[in-house]
Image (spheres, rainbow, N blue to C red):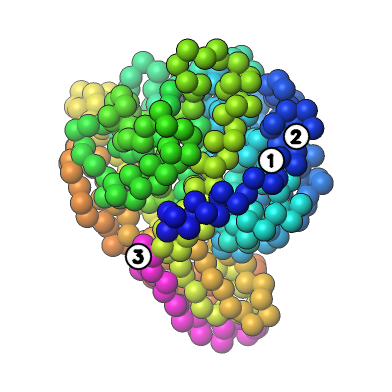
């Protein structure tokens, strides 16, 4: 599979070469964007390519009241069509400007390539949906500071395994910027997630702490991190985040243990000895970044790397899958004098519109089998190897939200499950259903 992906990507030089108006970047830019530039560029892409690009505003304004914006990109983007989702974000740290540029340039690149009819990109966008949020810590970016306007490192504020370190925030999920990413990944089937940072040369994956041991999906992580690191360059190291340096409350740990989508921290940096300029950190890094991102997008589209629910439902029905569970911080001193973890509820939910006249659907989802987390109600339980077998709860609904059928669905990695929605179909057009 890796070899096939290699060949496909190697055949892709054309779109970048075609877009060399001012610089080698897809946008032709030669300097960093301001916040206004990001917003204008996103608006323009969405306006000029309504078939490919849909704007997205995250639900929580920053602590200083700014909006956090992104884009969804896929073929026929307005349809809620059940493609697997690749989410990539930049600038958890507001002073790591190249991380936002790389995310934005990849969006521009894909849209340019797809609208020019590039067969490789077009085929990928037939099979997967990309969500980009180039600047997640908008206040930090505007002030060129690592932290948010509440002096919190938002990448220490995610609730899973959280500890009250000095930059972690007053409580798990205290920061709207972190809750935005929680929302983003909880409301769609993000089978791959990459958060960009600078400035080292690594591709990192969970866990964040040595004491918890490797995750259940360590082999898949090693495989994809290795392929991405190779794309970035010979000096890039794929490894678990704990072996880079230990932290707490980062996005990737929560993302993986909540959703089982593969979650990576990609850190780019010029080779040692080179100056850190727009040229070296963005223009010269971008060609490798795009290849690393194609590895992630290929992983997203690969049915062996997610699960599929398929079947037949009434045209115009809405299908929804949901699951709810509690997740935990690490133990820490509580106001009542005890030292124990805090719990927080997590709900994953996403939906699919039935638009085909024959009602057939094919829904790419994360597996229902969730990795047993090392952080639990009664403390830290390292070296977990198992999975919770809790199902997705699938509902078949009328467009007005009337639930006509509810059925549990267990589906494992790489598996396709067919659900029987005859009850929903029988009742969909009945008028007086109670
Ligand atoms: Zn960073």
Image position, residue 315 (x, y; %) = 65, 77
Q: Residue at label 1?
A: 16
- Is residue 408 in the magenta section? no
Dot 1 falls on a residue whose secondary structure is: helix
Which mark sits nearer the N-terminus, 1 or 3?
Answer: 1
The structure residue drawn at horizontal position 73% and vertical position 28%, both measured from the top left corner, is 23
Q: CA distance from mark 1 to mark 3?
A: 38 Å
Coordinates of residue 78 in the picture (x, y in percent): 70, 57
Q: Nearer the viewer, residue 190 or 20?
A: 20
Q: Which residue is label 2 attached to?
A: 20
To which quarter of the image does residue 58 belong?
A: top right
Is residue 25 among what the camera can see? yes
Q: Judge by depth and name the residue closer to the eye, 25 or 44.
A: 25
Relative vertical location of residue 392 with respect to residue 182 in this rendering, above or below: below
The span shown in magenta is 409-434
- The outermost residue toward the right is 48
In the shown orientation, is residue 130 left or right of residue 227? right
Is the C-beta separation of discs 2 and 1 under 8 Å?
yes
Q: Does the beta carbon at disc 1 come under 8 Å from ligand 1?
A: no
How far separated are the C-alphas under marks 2 and 3? 44 Å
Q: Are circles 1 and 3 on residues that touch, CB within 8 Å?
A: no
Residue at figure coordinates x 49%, y 51% from the top left: 6
Question: In the displayed structure, would residue 191 be above or below residue 419?
Answer: above
Residue tagged by mark 3?
Answer: 412
Give how far across and how far down residue 36 sits, in percent.
74, 25
- Front-most of residues 411 and 101: 101
Q: Is 356 left or right of 149, judged from the image as shown? A: right
The numbered mark, 2 or 3, whose residue comes first in the sequence reads 2
């Amino acid at each position: 599979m890796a070899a096939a992906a290699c060949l496909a990507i190697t055949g892709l030089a054309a779109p970048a070469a075609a877009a060399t108006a001012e610089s080698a970047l897809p946008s032709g830019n030669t300097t960093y964007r301001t916040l206004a530039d990001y917003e204008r560029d996103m608006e323009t892409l969405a306006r000029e390519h309504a078939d490919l690009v849909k704007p997205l505003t995250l639900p929580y304004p920053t602590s200083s009241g700014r909006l956090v914006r992104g884009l969804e990109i896929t073929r026929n983007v307005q349809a809620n069509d059940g493609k697997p989702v690749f989410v990539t974000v930049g600038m958890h740290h507001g002073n790591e400007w190249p991380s936002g540029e790389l995310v934005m340039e990849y969006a521009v690149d894909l849209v340019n390539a797809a609208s020019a009819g590039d067969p490789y990109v077009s085929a990928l966008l037939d099979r997967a949906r990309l969500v980009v949020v180039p600047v997640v810590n908008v206040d930090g970016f505007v002030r060129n500071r690592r932290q948010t306007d509440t002096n919190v490192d938002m990448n220490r504020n995610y609730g899973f395994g959280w500890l009250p370190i000095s930059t972690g925030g007053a409580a798990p999920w205290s920061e709207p910027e972190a809750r935005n990413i929680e929302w983003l990944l909880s409301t769609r089937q993000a089978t791959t997630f990459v958060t960009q940072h600078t400035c080292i040369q690594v591709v990192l994956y969970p866990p964040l702490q040595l004491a918890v041991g490797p995750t259940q999906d360590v082999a898949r992580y090693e495989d994809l991190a290795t392929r991405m690191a190779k794309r970035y360059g010979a000096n890039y190291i794929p490894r678990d985040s704990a072996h880079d340096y230990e932290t707490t409350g980062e996005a990737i740990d929560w993302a993986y243990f909540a959703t089982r989508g593969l979650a990576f921290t990609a850190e780019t940096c010029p080779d040692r000895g080179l100056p850190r300029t727009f040229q070296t950190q963005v223009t010269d890094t971008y060609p490798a970044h795009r290849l690393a991102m194609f590895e992630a997008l290929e992983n997203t589209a690969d049915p062996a790397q997610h699960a599929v629910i398929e079947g037949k439902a009434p045209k115009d029905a809405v299908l929804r899958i949901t699951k709810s569970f509690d997740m935990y911080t690490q133990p820490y001193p509580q106001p009542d004098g005890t030292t124990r973890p805090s719990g927080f509820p997590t709900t994953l939910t996403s939906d699919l519109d039935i638009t085909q006249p024959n009602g057939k659907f094919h829904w790419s989802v994360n597996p229902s089998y969730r990795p047993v987390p090392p952080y639990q109600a009664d403390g830290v339980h390292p070296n977990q190897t198992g999975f919770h077998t809790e199902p997705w709860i699938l509902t078949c609904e009328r467009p007005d939200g009337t639930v006509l059928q509810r059925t549990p669905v267990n589906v494992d990695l790489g598996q396709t499950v067919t659900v029987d929605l005859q009850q929903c179909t029988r009742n969909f057009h009945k008028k007086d259903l109670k």
